[in-house]
Image (spheres, grey):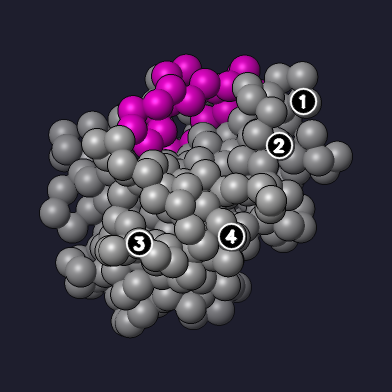
Amino acid sequence: MSAEGAAAPHVVEVPVSESTNAELVAALQSGESWPHLGALVTRDQRSGRGRLDREWVAPAGTALAISVVLRVGTVPDERRGWIPLVAGAAMVDAIGAQLPGAGVKWPNDVLVDGRKICGILAQVADFDTIVVGSGVNTRMTAEQLPVETATSFAAQGVVVDEERLIADYLRRLGELVDALGRGSVRDIVAERCVTIGQRVTAHLPGGERITGRAMGLDELGHLLIDGASRPIAVGDIVHLRPA
C-alpha cells in the first residue's frame, strides 16, 4: 500500500505518564482494543524503565517516550527475539532522516556518534502481542544529559520534528515487522548494527565476561563474538576503544 493510501496511525498522546509501556501493557491486558502499530506517546514520563529494570527519567519536555502495540501472530516464535533489534533498526532510520550517524548498539540501544540517544524495551502483553517502548532524547541540552555517554538531538545541534519522527518510526517499524513475518531480517539489522566489527566486552548474567571482536548476528539475532564458545543471547555490551 502506498504512503498516500495507508491508514493514519493510531497515536494517543498523554500529557504525563508514569510509564507508557506499563500503561499500554495494562490497557491491553484489561481488554482495551488497540490496533497493530497503535502508539501511546508522552513528553513527560516519570518512572520509565529500561532493560534489567533500570530507571529511565528525563526532565519534562526533553525526551519523547513512545510505546507501540505489535500484533505478531504472523511472526514465527523463533523469530520474535528479533523484535527489539527490528525496533532499533526502525528507530535508526527514523532518527537518521533528521540526524545522520545513527546506529544500533546490540541489543537495543540507538547511538549517534557513539553516544546513546534512544533506548528500547520490549514487553509481552499476551502470546501474540508485544509492546515496544522507546525513549528518545529530543530537546535535552548537553547540561541535562544524565551521563557523558548520552546525547540528544539538541546536543547534536538539531531541532527535531517530533511528529515526523513518530510517523517515520511507525511506518518503518510496520515494514520491518512485516518483513520479519515473511523471513529473515538479519541483513537489514546487521547493516545498521554498529556493534559488529568492534572489540567489545559482553557482561553476562551471573558475572561472566567475554571480550573479543563482534563478528555478526546469528539467525536468532544473538551476537557472535570471536573466540566465544557460544552466541550471546543476553548481556550488556561495552564497546571498547581501540588500543
Pointer 2 and pointer 3: residues touching (CB < 8 Å)? no
Q: Amino acid at mark 3?
A: Ala
Along the line of sight, which residue is nearer the eye, 21 or 83?
83
Q: What residue is drawn where x is 28% and y is 63%?
A: 230
State the SS at label 3.
Answer: loop
**Magenta segment, which residues?**
36-62
* Mark with earlier residue (4, 1): 1
Q: Which mark is residue 141?
A: 1
Q: Amino acid at mark 4?
A: Gln
Left or right for 85, reference 35: right
Classify residue 228 by image quadrant.
Answer: bottom left
Query: Which mark lies nearer to you, 2 or 3?
Result: 3
State the SS at label 4.
Answer: loop
Image position, residue 144 (x, y; %): 71, 20
Residue hosting label 3 = 228
Query: Which mark lies nearer to you, 3 or 1?
Result: 3
* Mark with earlier residue (2, 1): 1
Residue hosting label 2 = 152
Q: Amino acid at mark 1?
A: Thr
Along the line of sight, which residue is nearer the eye, 211 or 46?
211
Pointer 4 and pointer 1: residues touching (CB < 8 Å)? no
Image position, residue 170 (x, y; %): 50, 57
Pointer 2 and pointer 1: residues touching (CB < 8 Å)? yes
CA distance separating discs 2 and 1: 7 Å
**Crowd band around label 2 with a 10 angstrom C-alpha radius: few (<14), some (14–19), many (20+):** many
* Mark with earlier residue (3, 4): 4
Visible residue check, residue 136:
yes
**In the displayed structure, would residue 109 be above or below residue 173?**
above
**In the displayed structure, would residue 180 be above or below residue 53?**
below
**Crowd band around label 3 with a 10 angstrom C-alpha radius: few (<14), some (14–19), many (20+):** few
